[in-house]
Image (cartoon, rainbow, N blue to C red):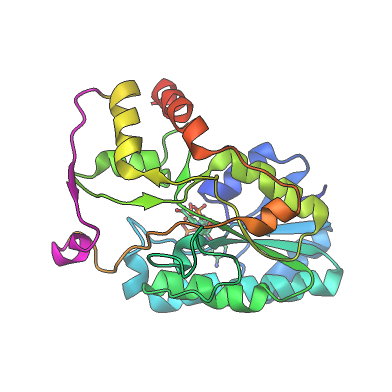
Amino acid sequence: MKTLVFGPGFLGQRLCAQLPGAVLSRVDITDAAAVREALREHAPEAVINAAGKTGRPNVDWCETHQAETYRANVVGPLVLADACAARGAYLLHIGSGCVFYGDSPAPGGWREDDPANPISFYSRTKYAADLVLGKLPHVGVARIRMPLDGRPDARNLITKLSKYRFVIDVENSVTVVDDFVSVAGALVERRAQGVFHVTNPGAMKHRDLLAAYRRHVDPSHAAEFIPAEELVTRGLAAAARSNCILASDRLAALGITMRPIADVLDGLVAEYARHA
Ligand SMILES: NC(=O)c1ccc[n+]([C@@H]2O[C@H](COP(=O)([O-])OP(=O)(O)OC[C@H]3O[C@@H](n4cnc5c(N)ncnc54)[C@H](OP(=O)(O)O)[C@@H]3O)[C@@H](O)[C@H]2O)c1
């Protein structure tokens, strides 16, 4: 399928490398005229929005760069939705499961239509976009969490966690990047509407990931585990981080499956070791 991907970052580049028919655009998604021109030039059947401000060196940047963050994460996605509607193109927007903080209201994890409780400015902008995009008939929102990949990258959770001296002792839903790319392709094929939780079944503890890291990458790796609340009180982060477990009922209802994280974690870290 002819797909135009906006956002030349970690996920945008992977989508273009692995999705047949995908082409990368470097256009500023807040520039409505430039977006319309890109859609006219490429005439895609579908658009994927992988553009957004995620913060450098980390998401705390968004707390102090609010205008850049809401323009890229709220205004830009709405510009894309408008331009796609005008051309009859489908839009798949990459959302984030980090709009949820803590335990889900019902057992089994946070569901797609649960009201979220974002705390950080980044999470608030991601949820603001979801609230509108999640209701539009030509738009799908793929919420991912803590991407894990077999290749080192500053955005890869394996790379991130392996560099921290203090690591919060938590359990989360996570997204394997290869699986995300396959699911994104399937959602685009179906022009699937609404919010989807694109996370691998099961949950992963940070300590399990780092145990695999010690087995495959660096036997001497050491980290001190601390309670989640201490991340901010120790001054290690400016804003609280989301830790949560998601249910993926809507993906399952479409017959789209992902591999359980418990089945892939060890092999993924072994692959990471080969590329490290
Ligand atoms: N990585 C994660 O942990 C994670 C988790 C959940 C959801 N997501 C979502 O996934 C999407 C892609 O994230 P990623 O991990 O690939 O992050 P990334 O590597 O930072 O990629 C985002 C890309 O978008 C670009 N960008 C920013 N503002 C833009 C604008 N106005 N117009 C066009 N491009 C713009 C960035 O350029 P600059 O670097 O120049 O700003 C960067 O190249 C984001 O929406 C993010 O919220 C990521």
Task: Say left or right for 71 vs 162.
Answer: right
Task: Say left or right for 145 vs 208.
Answer: right
User: In the rendered image, is residue 269 in sight?
Assistant: yes
Is 111 rendered above or below residue 127? above
Is 194 rendered above or below residue 66? above
Task: Say left or right for 41 vs 18.
Answer: right
Residue 275 sits in quarter: top left
Q: Tell me what residue is drawn at x 44 percent, y 70 percent.
A: 123
Q: Tell me what residue is drawn at x 75 percent, y 65 percent.
A: 193
Q: Nearer the viewer, residue 27 or 47?
A: 47
Q: What segment carries the magenta color?
A: 219-235
How many labels, in total? 0
Q: Nearer the viewer, residue 179 or 229?
A: 229
Residue 6 position in % (x across, y down): 64, 58
Q: Any magenta on residue 231?
A: yes
Q: Tell me what residue is drawn at x 68 percent, y 49 percent.
A: 184
Residue 61 position in % (x across, y down): 33, 66
Residue 122 position in % (x across, y down): 42, 70
Q: Quadrant of the C terminus?
A: top left
Q: Tell me what residue is drawn at x 19 percent, y 39 percent.
A: 223
Residue lying furthest left: 234
User: In the rendered image, is residue 31 in sight?
Assistant: no
Residue 189 position in % (x across, y down): 81, 51
